[in-house]
Amino acid sequence: MTDPLARLQAELQRLPKLAVAVSGGVDSLTLAHVASGIVPDFHAIHAMSPAVPPAATDRVRQQAKVHGWRLRLVDSGEFADPHYRANPHNRCYFCKSNLYGTMRRVFDGPIAAGTNTDDLGEYRPGLIAADDYDVLHPYVAADIAKDDIRAIARACGLDEIADLPAQPCLASRVTTGIAIRRDDLDFIDMVETLVRADTPGMDIRCRITGDGVVLETGTPMPDATVASVADLCRRANRPFAGSRTYVRGSAFVIPGE
């Protein structure tokens, strides 16, 4: 079977019930869309958190309304976890442990995430948490990569979803070892929303570093945009450390490296 959508459907058809963790990105939204048309007892679960951009939550709500999903919004409680707030190199483990633990408490069937085969070659502490809670990975089981997911989304008529840039949680913008704070995450979202309005579809990261706020973008920003970010930092009493080319995972530091 060579068609990625057909392979995914075959994986999902064997499940009488399923809850998908829906973050608001292309991976989880596409998985939820396909599963909702196949799994008889389908549920979407979305975690409300300061680390989740409000635009992502709005996107999940809109998709659930349009496609008739049974959507449950939950507080996964990671901000009550001091291990998460300390922002160690394995912060994602504590985030996902809280998420999957919450899903297990509110749903009594199999739970799934949007992990794909491209994720398997990276350092992903969240996958350890997924193993702890027996989370299913339908994309991995169907040998589906990121580009396949975008193709599936387009095949399902989800063109706007297919074109979404990768956008991990806002906490991923904070350099390892700097504590996760709600006000920092709110500020990150404010900056990225401002820049994204001028450059839709571009990779944008507002980083919180030891030197201050750093703006990373896929291509150089106009001077006026950079000046607007610098002014926003000044008014928020935050040092602006300049702009640079986007580097995936640049806020992540592994001890000893």
Image: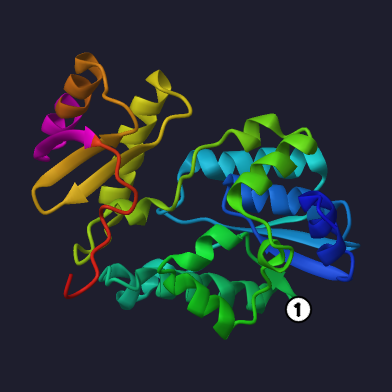
| Along the line of sight, the residue nearer the viewer: 195 or 46 | 195
Instruction: Say above or below: 142 vs 167.
Output: below
Task: Give how far across and how far down residue 65 sits, in percent.
Answer: 76, 40
Q: Secondary structure at mark 1?
A: loop
Task: Give how far across and how far down residue 205 sits, in percent.
Answer: 32, 41
Residue type highlighted by circle 1: Asp
Please state if 205 lies on the left or on the right of 32 as rendered: left
Please state if 148 lies on the left or on the right of 165 as rendered: right
Its colouring scheme is rainbow
Instruction: Say above or below: 235 vs 118.
Output: above
Quarter where residue 175 is shown: bottom left
Would you name the residue on which mark 1 appears?
108
Instruction: Locate the N terminus and report the quarter of the image it occupies.
Output: bottom right
Q: Which residues are magenta?
A: 231-244
Instruction: Locate the C terminus and report the quarter of the image it occupies.
Output: bottom left
Quarter where residue 115 is shown: bottom right
Instruction: Say above or below: 128 vs 91.
Output: below
Task: Give how far across and how far down residue 23 sits, in percent.
Answer: 57, 53
